[in-house]
Amino acid sequence: MVLVRLKSFERKLLEDLKDKFSIIKQNVTTYEMRIKDLPESIKKRFISSDGMYLIRIFPSGNIWNPSFLERFVHEIRTVDPDAIGDPVTLYVFTKAFRDACIKAAIYAIIFIFVLLLFTLKDFAYSLLVMIPLILGTIWTMGLMDLFHVNFNLANSLFLPLIVGAGVEYGIIIIRRWRELKDQSIGDHVLFPFSTIKGVLLAGLTTTVGFGSLIISDHQGIYSLGLLAVIGSLCILSAAILFLPALLYIINLGSRRKER
């Protein structure tokens, strides 16, 4: 019984609303709004003194996504190469900063390699010192996709920072290997545990230092810390696991040639 009454009330309410809207529609005179009908304060914001109109385009996606931001800016510039706005400014500034960090990392690698040549006085040894850094960086790029980490305005600093921090592992191992290669047992050059422990300790302290940035609430600082930790561990792993194995293969090949 109650349900029947409620349905009847709902029907009558809707009929009454239709009548009211019909009355309002009959008594309201509407016309198409024109630009001249807009307040002067709004027209000044969107129309210049020489009659040029301001067109605002809002992105449909997240501009903090680098791939979307790049696509959005490129599409805008196909319409107007001189378009400006926050997404364009963010894209230009981020790209310039990232390119600057890449150049800084390249210059650092070149200067470090020259310094190694001057110190070690051997091209091959200087190249071997750089291998953990190069290999660890390649591993880092691969893991970035696994952990869904992209380069941004903050973590681009990782590149020049990790170059100086990562090359020291190769220096320690190569210098120690040069000291011990003439004291080899058969075809083996035995590294003392103190050398590996020193490299491991240097790598872990660097990792912990960078890792402290991960606790930051700022997403940019967090991504910088995460990327630096991944990079430090990759370079450390390459120095401890790959470089000694490579040195063993090189030493084995040279001794076989001597025989």
Image (spheres, rainbow, N blue to C red):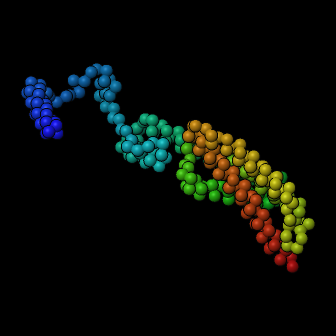
User: Which quarter shows the C terminus?
Assistant: bottom right
The residue sitting at 55% across, 55% down in the picture is 145
Name the residue furthest right. Answer: 183
Can you name the residue that lies furthest to the front here? 1
Q: Quadrant of residue 56?
A: top left
Q: Residue furthest bottom?
A: 259
Front position in the image: 240 or 246: 240
Seen in the image, is 192 located left or right of residue 245?
A: right
At x 32%, y 28%, the residue is: 46
Q: Position of residue 112 (x, y in %)?
A: 75, 50
Q: How far across and how far down the image is residue 110, in percent? A: 71, 51
Q: Is residue 105 left or right of residue 152?
A: right
The correct choice, above or below, for 187 with respect to 213 in the image is below
Q: How many marks?
A: 0
Residue 149 falls left or right of residue 22:
right
Give the quarter of the image for residue 139. bottom right
Give the residue displayed 62% in from the left and 48% down from the top.
Answer: 227
Q: Position of residue 80 (x, y in %)?
A: 37, 41
Q: In the rendered image, which quarter contains the N terminus?
A: top left
Q: Is residue 259 above or below residue 89?
A: below
- x and y percentages locating residue 161 in the rendered image: 68, 45
Name the one closer to the observer, 200 or 94. 200
**Can the viewer see residue 126?**
yes
Which residue appears at 17% of the width and 39% of the height? 3
